[in-house]
Amino acid sequence: MSILNADLHCHSVVSDGTLTPEALAARAAANGVELWSLTDHDEIGGQERAAAAARSHGMKYLTGTEISVTFADHTVHIVGLGFDPRNDDLVQGLSRMRGGRDQRARLMSDGLARAGIHGAYEGALKYVGNPDLISRTHFARFLVESGVCSDTNEVFRRFLTEGKPGFVTHRWAPLRDAVQWITRAGGMAVIAHPARYGFTPNEEYALFLEFKAHGGRGVEVVTGSHTTAEYVTYGETAREFGLASSRGSDFHSPEESRTDLGGLAFLPGELTPVWEVLADRIQ
Ligand code: AMP
Ligand code: MN
Ligand code: MN
Ligand code: MN
């Protein structure tokens, strides 16, 4: 067992979390996290605040982000860790990516209006901390507030997933671009929560092969999105593909997240942790 309490995946108000980077850092420290990373979706605007807050609590820090990618017509998330947040290609690539979100949100709102739910765009905006990063999560919060659904899971199931009225197909970054932005900025690309994608075994194999070919080096094994059985499955996948293993709660909000910061099982000891490979990138 690798007993470092590392939590290398969570979200702040800079994307679709409900806490500030400072509040997350305080919560992580209180929960015993020793090495932390804030990984906002498609955005690194919170990195300086997160690193400073980590320092003030005596926690080690790795820079982080979670990039939305389209692979084989599925949305896949690639976590980046330990990159230089001032790297131009990374900064500009992410900025271009975020540019599509507002139009997507307006189309989502149109779809919801056709299903009888009006004002969803404006409603979702009330929950947005970063106007560049309106996400499905913000719509989900609005639909809970307005009493249409009782929790955000129900909103996703009934309104925000493929085939449902508020779903809009969107083309995110190509896998190669996301991996290269991270890698060329000195960081490590990590496949986030692989069990979540619903890939067939062949599709999943293709994802891992292409990811490695582009320079990807890690995979999340212990995450809030995996069952204990999936820790074992993806630990084996990590070894099969020669990837380092990561651990992260994917914490978004005290009200919505089942797994708290630092609250996961430890990484199995036979795996190579990402933080060993990234030792010289830890702040
Ligand atoms: P977006 O990037 O706008 O497509 O939003 C994706 C975000 O929605 C994810 O990062 C999760 O935070 C959230 N999400 C996706 N599926 C669900 C679900 N079934 N229940 C609750 N939240 C979800
Ligand atoms: Mn999210
Ligand atoms: Mn994700
Ligand atoms: Mn996430």
Image (spheres, rainbow, N blue to C red):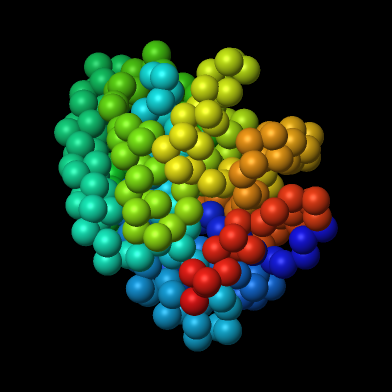
x, y percent for residue 21: 43, 68
x, y percent for residue 28: 59, 69
The relative height of residue 211 versus residue 159 in the rendered view (above or below) is below
User: Residue at 19% of width from left, 44% of height from top?
Assistant: 96
Q: Quadrant of residue 265?
A: bottom right
x, y percent for residue 214: 42, 38
Q: Quadrant of residue 220?
A: top right
Please name whichever residue, 176 or 126, is drawn nearer the observer in this view of the structure: 176
The relative height of residue 164 versus residue 66 in the rendered view (above or below) is above
Is 92 situated left or right of 56 in this image?
left
Q: Quadrant of residue 274?
A: bottom right
The relative height of residue 102 versus residue 183 in the rendered view (above or below) is above
User: Residue at 64% of width from left, 41% of height from top?
Assistant: 242
x, y percent for residue 159: 41, 24
Residue 108 visible to an observer of this rendering: yes
Residue 138 visible to an observer of this rendering: no
Q: In the rendered picture of this protein, how many numbered marks are placed on residues?
A: 0
Please name whichever residue, 105 or 56, is drawn nearer the observer in this view of the structure: 56
Is 20 situated left or right of 2 in this image?
left
Is 194 situated left or right of 69 in this image?
right
Please name whichever residue, 42 or 71, is drawn nearer the observer in this view of the structure: 71
Q: Quadrant of the N terminus?
A: bottom right
User: Residue at 37% of width from left, 74% of height from top?
Assistant: 49
